[in-house]
Image (tube, rainbow, N blue to C red):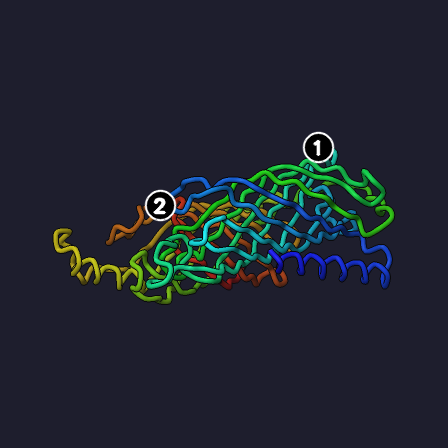
Amino acid sequence: MKHILLIICLFISYFGFSQEEKKAVNSFVDINYFRGNIPLHNRSILHLIQGHPDGIILSWSKKTFGHKEWEQYYNYPDYGASLSYQRYGNTVLGENYGLYAHYNFYFLHRNLMLRIAQGLAYNTNPYDKYTNHKNTAFGSTILSSTYVMINYKKERLFDRFGLQAGLSLTHYSNANFKAPNNSVNTIAFNLGVLYNLDDEDMSYAEVKAKENVTEPIRFNFAFRSGVNESDVVGSGQFPFYIISCYADKRLSRKSALQLGADAFFSEFLKALIHYRSIAYPEEQIDRNTDHRRVGIFVGHELFVNKMSLLTQFGYYVHYPFDFEGRTYQRIGLKRYFGDKVFAAITLKTHAAKAEALELGIGIRL
């Protein structure tokens, strides 16, 4: 806890100094204390659910006022960065420190704030075969993390200070980068205070007429890769390669629909087939079973400036080996560089079970 207090002091000192050097930064800092529960999504973590986890989220957010068109279409959102600290009251799970990028979206006359954040976290006590074999949630020190926060918020209640309160959901997982990876979610109540770095806000730009944006069907080609491991602890990390081809149709300024196919070349699955053919002879698995898979999918893309949120639902049409079922999902972020080239970071899952964190590049023609 001493570390997070030091970070808070440095954080406030930095922005206090910045305020003296530069006026009209049009941003605010907020600090939220949260306390809640770990829901049971997997019986393998039942022994880890003890007490009530709590922690702090410290954030800086830059306001927008509609000077760019996309800001107007999304009701003038904020964007910024967050630091988090979470303790579980459980020496097995250790503590988590997180760093995130986030967006704040507003509703109900800007009184209701929805924050979506994605980043990385550091766990102080991951699984170790000899010293911490009970931690089946975190198999590595570095974790992928997401948090969603919904707050009722009142700004400038006392000069530059405001208050907010609501609910948050935090997820920690290493996306099967290394086993074990049963992950932990926290549902919590949070209460926070915010401080505006300006005496008053700028005025919002007038909302322009929302022109309808449509495009002809475009064709996309993407290559994704990374490293992952099966659920068999100690089975080893292997690279995977995914080739995706899909068509998309832009329906509006915000949305596009997708239809396409994926080809999966997962080396961990090849090793898993070999392992199960030897370890479980009663299953009568042929060690030469094809490890490659082919899936078809439908998807949606939500555009926010040069970024977009990608969601896809797929079904394996070539599925020689049964691994986590025939359906799969993908969710993640894309970043466009110009009109054609993009990069993406996506999470591939089978319902609540993650398979891989994918890093990809692609082209949209």
- Identified by mark 1, the residue type is Leu
Which residue corresponds to the image point at 86% horizontal and 46% vertical from the top-left? 200
Q: What is the x, y in percent for residue 304?
A: 64, 50
Secondary structure category for the residue under label 2: strand
| Residue 320 vs residue 142, the one in the foreground | 142
Residue hosting label 1: 108
- Identified by mark 2, the residue type is Thr
| Residue 140 vs residue 357, the one in the foreground | 140
Which residue corresponds to the image point at 68% horizontal and 54% vertical from the top-left? 80
Q: Earlier in the sequence, mark 1 or mark 2?
A: 1
- Count all numbered tags in the image, as a single digit: 2
Secondary structure category for the residue under label 1: loop
In the picture, residue 105 is in which quadrant? top right
Residue hosting label 2: 327
Label 1 to label 2, Cα distance in Å?
37 Å
Residue with the most extreme top position: 108
